Every structure is written in structure tokens, then in C-alpha cells.
Image: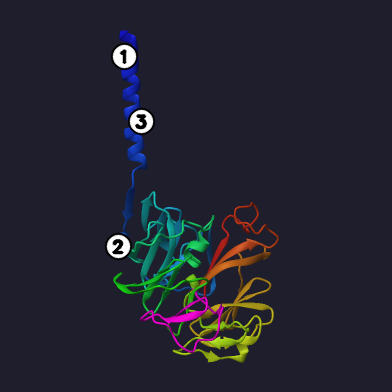
């Protein structure tokens, strides 16, 4: 009988210890690590390939690269050849990271529980936090995290604001302070923002300043043109009839150039199709082109997008263009469409980064 009691007591103790350990490991937790001085500063380089990474970076303030993983957002210097030890990071358990955007040098992360967190890109310190009350999609960045930092679902920027949307409402917050700007019952699909100050949603457009509907907008559904990351800062669009419009002002302006397939907007100008090249964007007034033979052409400068003896047999996935940097996700030219399948990406370090 004594042996039975001992064994029973021992089993209870072991179960209790296991429960305590499990609680300590799995309990909700948040770990933030800020950067140490000296803080990163904007960096420029001569036009050239500067490195490769296995994850897609959101380049912020031409100083840092911000990466997304399932439960963490972190940063390293923009000039690094590969992914470095993080200079700052934020990890939230068990919440999942839904999307990341940046306005100026403020990095804004959206989490599945609806929390928005504004962090200084340069020192990694939290600036503001808002509980939006709107659940966000779970992490969907696959191996590179490209969708999370370059095309986050339901997360947009424009006019100094960050906007979050679900199926029935759009909320706008000041990107500097996190203060609410406006909230409107907008049912949204395939949304984008324009450089002219509109939030375009399915059939209609709304003011980024007030959330009020904008009259006289071309009939949708719309095809955005010349957008930056997060489907934001788009310079133009095509309407339901395929007609092109510049969207750089308070009212859209008709552009027959944008009627052409392959045309786009860069640097505020309608750009016709470029033979043998794809327009990635504009940098300080210069067109940034990806040629069919996988060279990067910026103004009069051109160089191959490869490190050492890498082949140039890849196709572009998502990308980002800033004033001084370009980052492109490279996919295998003949690989499967599913990112989870082997051979989808061009190589392990599939994101190539170049100074421009």
C-alpha cells in the first residue's frame, strides 16, 4: 500500500512539474529588443548588387531591412550582404504576424489579434500601440515572408495614415501617433491607395483624409497601376472598360497611354510598354527596369542581377523599389506555382538586393 501511495504521489508531482513547465513555455509572452547605439542611418552605394537574403526585406528609410516571420518582426542594416543578427526585434507568442508596412521611419506591424504596433525603424523602440478590435489574417508569408512585408492582406498606407480593413469596415490611424483618424463601413475587396489621396475599394473611391466617398470616380472594378508595396501609392488605374487613368491628383485624369497592356505609372508619369523590359518603379526620377535577360537598368546604368556565377534564368516574384535600393524575390523559371513545393524559389537565398 505504501508503495502505491509513493508511486501515486510521485506521478502527481511529475504531472504538476510538467504542467508548470508547459505553462511557462506556452503562456502568452512578448519579447522586445531595441537597437543599441549607434543607430543605423540612410546608406547609399554605387549601383551594384549588394547581397542576397533568404527572406524578403521591407527596406525602410534606406537604412534598415525589416523581416517578417510567423511570430516575429526584426531588422538588420540595409547594407549587409546577407541576413545579419537582428539589431532590433519584437516577438509575440502565440500571436501571429499578419502584415508589416512603413510610413517614413515608422514600422507598423499588424497582428492576428488585431493589435497594431508602431516601432521606430532606427532604434526599434515602440512608439505606439492600438488594439483595433478587428481580427487580422494569420501569417501567410511562406518561406520568404514576401507577402507579409510587400503585399499584406488588408493593410495599406497613404497620406500619413495606416489603414486596416476587413469584409465590412475600414479603419484609418495616424502613422506617427496611432491616433484614430476615421472609421467607415466600407465593404472592401482588392483595395489600393493612390498617390492622389484616395482609398479605392472594389467599385468606389474614398478620401484618405476623411473616409468620405469621392464623387466622379471611373467605374470599377479597377486595376491598379504603378503601386508601391502593400498595394499603396498607386499612380494610376484601369477602369471596368480597360481605360487608363492617372491617379496622382484629387481627381483621376484620363490617359490613353495607360490603355495599352503593359503600360504603367512611374514617377508620376504614364509609361508606355518598354520593349524587352518590365517597369519596376521609379527612383529619384529615373525609371527602374528589369530587362528580359535579368539585368537591372536604372537610367543609363545597367548591370546583371546575379551574385558571382549565378545563372540569370529566373522570373520575378514580388519586389520593392526605394530611392536608393531594389529588392526582388526570384522564382524558378520552370518551378511549381505553389510556394510550398520544392523548386518554387530560384535558390535558397532567393531575394536579391541592389543599390541604385
Q: Are marks 1 and 3 in contact (CB under 8 Å)?
A: no
Mark 2 vs mark 3, CA separation in Å: 35 Å
Q: Would you say the magenta stretch is mainly helix, strand or loop? A: loop
Residue 24 x, y percent position in the rendering? 32, 39
Residue at 63 percent of width and 52 percent of height? 341
Residue at 60 percent of width and 56 percent of height? 339
Q: Which residues are magenta?
A: 199-228
Q: Identify the residue under disc 3.
A: 18
Quick one: 18 or 122, which is closer to the camera? 18
Residue 337 x, y percent position in the rendering? 65, 59
Q: Residues within 10 Å of mark 1 (few under 14, many from 20)?
A: few
Seen from this angle, which residue lies furthest top? 1
Query: Could you say which quadrant of the image residue 123 lies in?
Result: bottom left
Q: Identify the residue under disc 1.
A: 6
Residue at 42 percent of width and 83 percent of height? 213
User: Disc 3 on helix, strand or loop?
Assistant: helix
Which disc number belongs to residue 126?
Answer: 2
Give the number of the mark in front: 2 or 1: 1
Q: Is residue 7 above or below residue 229?
A: above
Give the number of the mark in front: 2 or 3: 3
Magenta segment: does it hold 204? yes
Magenta segment: does it hold 12? no
Q: Is residue 252 above or below residue 282?
A: below
Mark 2 vs mark 1, CA separation in Å: 52 Å
Mark 1 vs mark 3, CA separation in Å: 18 Å
Quick one: 143 or 6, which is closer to the camera? 6
For the question of whether residue 308 can be seen, the reply is: no
Amino acid at each position: 500500500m505504501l508503495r502505491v501511495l509513493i508511486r501515486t504521489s510521485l506521478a502527481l508531482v511529475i504531472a504538476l512539474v510538467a504542467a508548470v513547465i508547459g505553462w511557462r513555455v506556452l503562456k502568452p509572452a512578448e519579447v522586445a529588443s531595441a537597437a543599441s547605439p549607434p543607430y543605423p542611418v540612410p546608406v547609399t552605394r554605387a549601383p551594384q548588387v549588394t547581397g542576397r537574403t533568404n527572406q524578403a526585406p521591407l527596406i525602410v528609410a534606406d537604412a534598415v531591412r525589416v523581416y517578417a516571420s510567423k511570430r516575429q518582426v526584426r531588422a538588420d542594416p540595409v547594407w549587409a550582404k546577407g541576413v545579419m543578427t537582428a539589431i532590433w526585434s519584437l516577438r509575440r507568442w502565440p500571436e501571429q504576424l499578419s502584415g508589416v508596412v512603413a510610413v517614413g521611419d515608422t514600422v507598423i506591424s499588424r497582428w492576428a489579434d488585431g493589435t497594431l504596433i508602431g516601432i521606430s525603424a532606427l532604434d526599434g523602440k515602440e512608439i505606439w500601440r492600438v488594439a483595433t478590435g478587428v481580427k487580422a489574417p494569420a501569417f501567410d508569408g511562406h518561406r520568404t515572408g514576401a507577402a507579409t512585408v510587400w503585399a499584406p492582406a488588408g493593410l495599406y498606407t497613404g497620406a500619413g495614415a495606416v489603414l486596416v480593413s476587413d469584409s465590412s469596415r475600414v479603419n484609418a490611424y495616424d502613422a506617427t501617433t496611432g491616433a484614430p483618424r476615421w472609421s467607415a463601413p466600407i465593404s472592401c475587396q482588392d483595395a489600393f491607395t493612390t498617390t492622389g489621396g484616395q482609398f479605392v475599394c472594389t467599385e468606389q473611391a474614398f478620401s484618405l483624409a476623411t473616409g468620405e466617398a469621392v464623387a466622379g470616380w471611373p467605374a470599377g472594378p479597377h486595376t491598379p497601376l504603378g503601386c508601391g508595396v502593400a498595394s499603396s501609392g498607386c499612380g494610376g488605374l484601369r477602369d471596368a472598360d480597360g481605360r487608363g487613368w492617372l491617379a496622382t491628383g484629387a481627381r483621376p485624369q484620363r490617359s490613353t497611354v495607360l490603355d495599352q497592356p503593359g503600360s504603367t505609372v512611374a514617377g508620376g508619369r504614364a509609361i508606355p510598354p518598354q520593349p524587352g523590359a518590365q517597369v519596376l518603379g521609379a527612383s529619384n526620377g529615373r525609371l527602374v527596369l528589369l530587362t528580359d535577360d535579368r539585368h537591372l537598368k536604372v537610367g543609363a546604368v545597367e548591370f546583371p542581377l546575379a551574385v558571382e556565377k549565378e545563372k540569370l534564368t529566373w522570373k520575378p516574384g514580388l519586389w520593392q523599389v526605394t530611392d536608393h535600393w531594389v529588392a526582388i524575390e526570384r522564382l524558378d523559371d520552370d518551378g511549381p506555382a505553389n510556394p510550398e513545393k520544392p523548386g518554387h524559389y530560384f535558390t535558397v537565398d532567393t531575394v536579391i538586393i541592389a543599390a541604385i
